[in-house]
Amino acid sequence: MKQEDLFSMLQGLYKNNNQCPKLLAVGWEVDSAQVVQLAAIDFDIDYVGKVGDGLRSLRKGEKVEAVLINADADFDIFVATAALRLYTAAPIIILFSDEKPVNPALAVEAGADDWLPSAIQPREFTARVYARIRRHRFNQQPSAVFGYPNQLPSGPGLKQQRPMA
């Protein structure tokens, strides 16, 4: 069985699974992202080659759990990250190669949440992306769910109400 056949078969298994997080992969063609392909059995991935296509998808209201950006693509990844950040609060993860390393400070300033080497093992890639998604979901939940009031108290009595102040 060829790798392409196996990939399409595995993708077909997860198409209608609601528990499979949806990712938007920007800067790849479907067959060129080896790590992303190998992790595709854990995610529902939409591949777009250009940033404009990704922005159109997000503007239409497409819900994604995370955005992956290929640092080796033919666009400025920092401008792409900033543009995508305008349309989604989902974690943005940059995948870079040894030939084109990412400056972490610039990536964070542009709006990226994480950056990973493209030579990463698929299992570690999947674990790191799931960790980002979990943190994002946790941060999106109202604080009252966890037994805390929705708003912190303010005013002169704040210091007395905080523990260990």
Image (spheres, rainbow, N blue to C red):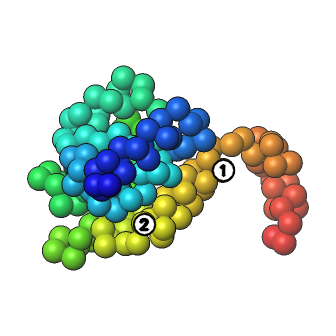
The x, y position of residue 150, in whole percent, is 76, 41
The x, y position of residue 85, in whole percent, is 37, 44
Q: What residue appears at the point 18 percent right and 61 percent down from the top-left corner?
A: 72
Q: What residue appears at the point 43 percent right and 57 percent down from the top-left corner?
A: 39
Judged from this view, the residue extending furthest toward the top is 60
Badge 2 marks a residue whose secondary structure is: helix
Residue 14's place in the image compared with 94, above or below, is above
Q: What residue appears at the point 42 percent right and 29 percent down from the top-left corner?
A: 62
Left or right? Give the position of 12 relative to 80. right
Q: Which mark is residue 127?
A: none
Residue 149's place in the image compared with 53, above or below, is below
Local crowd size for mark 1, using a 10 Å CA cut-off: few (<14), some (14–19), many (≥20): few
The x, y position of residue 2, in whole percent, is 28, 55
Badge 1 marks a residue whose secondary structure is: helix
Judged from this view, the residue extending furthest toward the front is 1
The answer to whether residue 90 is seen in the rendering is: no
Quarter location, residue 140: top right
Q: Pick whichever of labels 2 and 1 is earlier in the sequence.
A: 2
Q: Circle 2 is placed at which residue position? A: 122
Quarter of the image containing the C terminus? Answer: bottom right
Identify which amino acid the numbered label 2 is placed on. Answer: Pro
Q: Circle 1 is placed at which residue position? A: 138
Nearest the eye: 77 or 72: 72
Residue 47's place in the image compared with 75, above or below, is above
Mark 2 or mark 1, whichever is nearer to me: 2
